[in-house]
Image (cartoon, coloured by chain):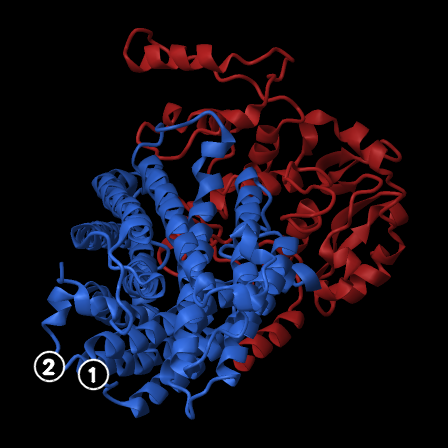
Chain colours: A blue, B red
Amino acid sequence: MLKYLFAKNEDIAPGTAAVFFGFSSIIWFVIGTGLGSFNAAKLAFPDFVTGSYLFSFGHMRQVHVLAVIFGWISMAFAMAMMYITPALGNTRLWSEKLGVWNCFLWNVGLSLGLTLLWTGMSSGREYSDMPWFIDLYIAAFIALPMAINVWMTIIKRRTQGIYTTNWFFGAGVFMVTIVFIVGNSPEWFNLTGLSEAYLTWWFAHNVLGLWITPIAAAIAYYTVPKVTGNPLYSHRIGHLHFWSVVVFYSTPAAHHLMSAPLPEWLKSFASVEGVLILVPAIAFVSNLLLTMQGKWHMFVENVEIKYTITGVLLAVPLNMQGGFQQTRAINWYVHGTGWIVAHAHLALLGFSTFLEGAAVYYGLQTILRRKLYSLALANFHFWFLLIGFAIYWISMTIAGLIQGAGKIYEVPYIDVVIAEHPYMIARWVGGTMVFTGNLVWLYNMWMTARAGAVIPEGRLPHELAYER
Amino acid sequence: MMITLYFPTVDMTSVAATETGLRKQLSYGRIGGFSYEDPFLKGAGKPKTVVLSQDPKTGQPIETVEAYVYEAGIPFPSGINHPRTLGPGVKELSEGKGQIGQADHSQGAVFVVARDSDSVYVENATATRGWQPAEVLTTGGDANTHYVGSGKIMFVREGCWWCHTLLPEETQDWQYFGVPPRLGDYNGESPTAFGSDRKAPDLLHVGARNSSKEWMMMHFFNPRLVQPHSIMPRYDYLWGEKDGNGNAIDFAAWRQAYTDYREGKTVYPPEVPSMASQSEIRYLVDFVLSLK
């Protein structure tokens, strides 16, 4: 990577930034899920590793969360943007060199930020835990260069219209920059108390609603038509999806603070807007599943479609849950329990990870012009990811319902902890399976780059998946 | 985005701080996350809470009062630096009768929460009663001094709030874990550290449920000493190198003795080392016991 940082832009091959982003994202995924598995072990067996603050759950929890969000998910998004945006504009990435610098500074900044968090330097606000100078770094050297590169590529495109995916990409990089800066503003403008709490959750919710969900969906809008060869079922529904995300997804943050003394009108408003999230969700899922018409065999045969459609299908329970659990009646029962943990993992480890997995699999093969090293290992990864996630999700949902019952019926808390113990072990087993699958993925992609069969010019990777 | 960003923020600034809100921000001090005076969240640069039952100036007995001591150089909390944070009414009283405008952080100051008919406000006791930080600390003594502000830092740094919320849910919780907070209870507090995922009991009023310092010590050193089924991590490293008597703590020997007890080789578990006066565990216990 270092040699590309100071090369001339013209000397850098197209797709270089995407490849670096792709491998970085996989490595961060391995790190993030490794930490997750370790943390889960500590919840099941509290005396697992003790004696130092470095291995304390409280120090590692946010490192796991942010490594996954900023490392895996966002870098996989960056990877997708670096090759899909130019492909859809029939052009090259605006600046390959800026992309490589972006990737380099991203890895440096994230490593630094997570190390500081690990040692205890924290702003103390959930999901925006990084101290303010790291926040500034992220805004200036991670979000902004990515946004500029994506926008300039869209502006310099050689096609007439802008395809749905690029709508989402262009809006997503804009919205995440605003959300990040505004969400972290309490540290810069002396916002305290409930205003700060509200902004913290406004950030935490909108980083999901205006960054992770739309960008993940945008990937599906690209991979499904590209790999199946079917045109997108309806661009009109795509636009309904886009605008309803912008309107409805940006408003329900207060449902995270239902029992805080915030204005009642705000909480009711958040609940109603939360249920309206079903509009973009139904638009997205129906559009993608109808695009699959006549090509459903590819759901079994093709790795990328398998990942994408699994992700799309997981959006169904995700958004049903999402709308459902922010109504006051359901929030009353499940808020603050393992149910919510399960839901968060359904969003990040289920829905979006499967879509990003497809983007990284497909992108690396296309850019490197190499056939996947091992289809068997890719399937192994898929099933370990899916089964590990399912174990996690089901066990935490049950644990959450137990906790909710404990909360409502005033059961002594320790009885709830005892009842949850088997599910905590199941959570650890599921998390460890995901981690194992990712290790295999890293090996598989590394070997693809090293020893994969070369794809001839004019062919696409999925066309020769079964050719020997 | 505009709707949800703009409206609640406007609303919040017209909220008057409650007595709880004033006590919280005066005992916690300035922001509770990363700051210049305490980058690695060690608990530095924070006020001390002293429970006084005699006037440090005259020595006369007075009704017990909590004094918040800001020694020279310790940054004042949000409400003193930005009185608008205190909310309408409280701001005017604090500036007029409380004379908070005269406090200078380079000289240090002592604050108390005062009451005027049915309003509460912050009183700068250094200006109104002549209480100097050093005098108050001497009068109170170590036993009556609580490191609540530094303890809040420990609570944030050690991630206690990943499992314990500071916000009873809008359910029967309000009978079980205590009264719900009110709108002005958080003025000037940062971070609020509500927590979101409750793997353990709510702590907003834990000091009212359990005020035993000894129980807390055992619980933090090894939670399974007081609750065999607890999944809480051990926080024995917060004790530091030395115990309250200045002797080095032998963690390996303690753990060996504890293992022997767990295996039934001894009848009693080993004694938990006492807390040193300026240790992180002392800060944390003081904070937890202040949650009433």
Query: Where is residue B65 drawn, in percent x and y?
Result: 72, 41
Q: Is residue A12 left or right of residue A401?
A: right
| Mark 2 neighbour class, 10 Å CA radius: few under 14, some 14 to 19, many 20 or more | few
Query: Where is residue A438 drawn, in percent x and y?
Result: 29, 48
Q: Is residue B243 above or below residue A308?
A: above
Report which residue position mark 2 lands on. A294
Q: Which mark is residue A230?
A: 1
Relative depth, front residue between A46 and B64:
A46
Subunit that carries the residue with mark 1 = A
Report the Cα–Cα distance between label 2 and label 1.
9 Å
> Element type at marker 1?
loop
Relative depth, front residue between A318 and A465:
A465
Question: Are the residues tagged 2 and 1 within 8 Å (C-beta)?
Answer: yes
2 or 1: tag closer to the N-terminus? 1
The residue depicted at 88 percent of the width and 50 percent of the height is: B104
Q: Is residue A167 above or below residue A321?
A: below
The residue depicted at 50 percent of the width and 68 percent of the height is: A202
The image quarter containing residue A352 is bottom left
Query: Where is residue A152 drawn, in percent x and y?
Result: 54, 79
Identity, as a three-letter code, of the amino acid under mark 2:
Gly
> Element type at marker 2?
loop
